[in-house]
């Protein structure tokens, strides 16, 4: 149903409209997109909790996944005057085996959050291939930071670091919980280091 709402809204937006109608339908379009993201997060969270989440194991390019995340979120960062970039600290194998879609989802969650909670400075995706052949990802921001006593809480479902976050920034509080569990399913561990008013580093 949400796909239909978004699809038909997009079709109507392509037709002749007066300014008021276009503004109202654009608000419908934006709200529908947010609602679809929340619905998908709840479905993913429920699937993981039920032990029904399965991962693909196919060849893919990490470079392509990272570039796609950067391209998708670049405008959002530009709108806030934030620099968004990737930094490959070492050469990374062109083809790796794993689930590209779920890696994209994890990075979209982490980078999207970083942009949301950063008012000035930058957000970076740092990638390093270890001597053992695994890949270390870091999402580094210069944002508002997370209090030390809230660091473990942010990975719990329906939880946000600050009680005002859901009102000010939006979101379901599921993105980090899903990301942590997806990383665990891949055999990794999602960690957080943060300093208030200086920024955060999510690594996995």
Image (cartoon, rainbow, N blue to C red):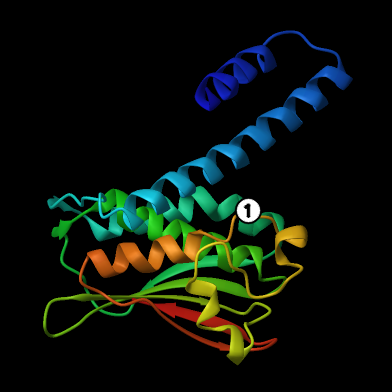
Question: How many neighbours does mark 1 have within 10 angstroms: few (below 14), some (14-19), or many (20 or more)?
Answer: some
Left or right: residue 170 versus residue 74 is right
Residue 78 location, quadrant? bottom right
Residues 47 and 38: in front is 47
Kindly give the residue lying farthest to the front in the view shown: 50
Residue occupying image coordinates x 39% and y 60%: 106
**Position of 91 relative to 194 (above/below):** above
Kindly give the residue lying farthest to the top in the view shown: 16
Residue occupying image coordinates x 67% and y 12%: 12
Whether residue 65 is visible to the viewer of this picture, yes or no, is no
- x, y (%) of residue 139? 45, 73
Residue occupying image coordinates x 68% and y 79%: 144
Left or right: residue 166 versus residue 130 is right
- x, y (%) of residue 122? 60, 73
Q: Mark 1 sits on what residue? A: 76
Element under label 1? helix
- x, y (%) of residue 146? 62, 82
Identify the image quadrant of the C terminus.
bottom left
Residue 195 location, quadrant? bottom right
**Position of 69 relative to 140 (above/below):** above
Left or right: residue 197 versus residue 64 is right
Whether residue 51 is visible to the viewer of this picture, yes or no, is yes
Total labels drawn: 1
- x, y (%) of residue 98? 17, 57
């Amino acid at each position: 149903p949400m796909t239909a709402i978004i699809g038909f809204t997009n079709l109507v937006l392509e037709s002749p409209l007066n300014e008021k109608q276009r503004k109202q339908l654009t608000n419908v379009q934006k709200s529908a997109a947010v609602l679809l993201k929340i619905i998908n997060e709840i479905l993913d969270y429920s699937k993981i909790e039920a032990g029904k989440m399965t991962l693909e194991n196919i060849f893919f390019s990490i470079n392509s996944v990272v570039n796609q995340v950067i391209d998708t979120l670049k405008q959002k960062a530009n709108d806030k005057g934030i620099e968004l970039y990737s930094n490959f600290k070492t050469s990374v194998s062109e083809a790796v085996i794993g689930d590209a879609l779920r890696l994209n989802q994890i990075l979209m969650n982490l980078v999207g959050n970083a942009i949301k909670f950063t008012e000035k400075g930058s957000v970076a995706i740092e990638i390093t291939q270890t001597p053992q052949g695994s890949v270390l990802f870091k999402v580094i921001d210069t944002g508002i930071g997370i209090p030390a006593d809230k660091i473990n809480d942010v990975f719990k479902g329906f939880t946000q670091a600050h009680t005002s976050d859901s009102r000010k920034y939006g979101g379901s509080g599921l993105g980090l919980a899903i990301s942590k569990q997806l990383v665990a399913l891949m055999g990794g561990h999602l960690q957080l280091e943060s300093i208030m008013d200086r920024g955060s580093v999510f690594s996995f």
